[in-house]
Image: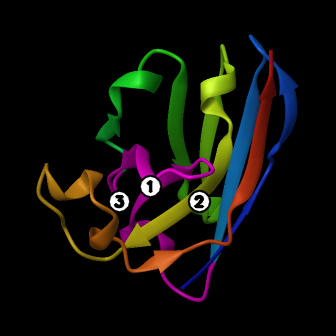
């Protein structure tokens, strides 16, 4: 499975962006997917996750109410709609996927995901 993230850019604080992650090379509909981010000098952290059916979503506390993960299985694409952005959201954003069925704790862990996209830069100016 290959993942291609896009949609990053420069935005002012309070603005919005939508990231996309297109999958190819496998059956997308049975993948659990997630978004991670990594800021300079920091560990890569979980941002949001979505079960293969799309029925369950998970967010890190700092983005709850501001970010929304969704997927379109017909387009083999997962999205991350980001609103009310602030400078602390500045990072490279990566999409990831796995065919495994992770437990609740594992959803938030990098090691759970087998496939990674190349990342897209999001910069939020104050």
Splitting the image into 4 quarters, where does residue 33 fall? bottom left
Measured in 3D between alpha carbons, the distance from the residue under mark 1 to the one under mark 3, in whole angstroms, is: 26 Å
The x and y percentages for residue 16 are 76, 22
26 in relation to 50, above or below: below
Q: Helix, strand, or loop for circle 2?
A: strand
Q: Helix, strand, or loop for circle 1?
A: loop
Q: Which residue does the numbered mark 3 point to in the structure image?
A: 52
**Mark closest to the chain's N terminus, 3 or 2:** 3
In the displayed structure, does residue 101 sit left or right of residue 18? left
35 is within the stretch colored magenta: yes
Residue 94: numbered disc: 2
Measured in 3D between alpha carbons, the distance from the residue under mark 2 to the one under mark 1, in whole angstroms, is: 13 Å
Which dot, 2 or 1, sits closer to the camera? 1
Which dot, 1 or 3, sits closer to the camera? 1
Q: Which residues are magenta?
A: 24-53
Measured in 3D between alpha carbons, the distance from the residue under mark 3 to the one under mark 2, in whole angstroms, is: 18 Å
Which dot, 3 or 2, sits closer to the camera? 2
Q: Which residue does the numbered mark 1 point to in the structure image?
A: 43
The x and y percentages for residue 99 are 31, 77
Crowd band around label 3 with a 10 angstrom C-alpha radius: few (<14), some (14–19), many (20+):
many
Which residue is rendered at x = 34% and y = 38% of the image?
57
46 in relation to 87, above or below: below
- Nearer-the-camera pick, 106 or 89: 89
The x and y percentages for residue 100 are 23, 75
In the displayed structure, does residue 119 sit left or right of residue 27? right
User: Which quarter of the rendering shows the C terminus?
Assistant: top right
Splitting the image into 4 quarters, where does residue 13 fall? top right
Crowd band around label 1 with a 10 angstrom C-alpha radius: few (<14), some (14–19), many (20+):
few
């Amino acid at each position: 499975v290959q993942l291609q993230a896009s949609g990053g850019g420069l935005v002012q604080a309070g603005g919005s962006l939508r990231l996309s992650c297109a999958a190819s090379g496998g059956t997308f509909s049975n993948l659990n997917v997630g978004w991670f981010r990594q800021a300079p000098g920091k560990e890569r952290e979980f941002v949001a996750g979505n079960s293969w059916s799309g029925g369950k979503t998970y967010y890190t506390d700092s983005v709850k109410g501001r970010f929304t993960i969704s997927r379109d299985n017909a387009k083999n694409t997962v999205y991350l709609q980001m609103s009310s952005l602030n400078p602390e959201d500045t990072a490279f954003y990566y999409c990831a996927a796995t065919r495994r069925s992770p437990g609740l704790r594992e959803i938030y862990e990098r090691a759970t995901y087998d496939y990674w996209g190349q990342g897209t830069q999001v910069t939020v100016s104050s």
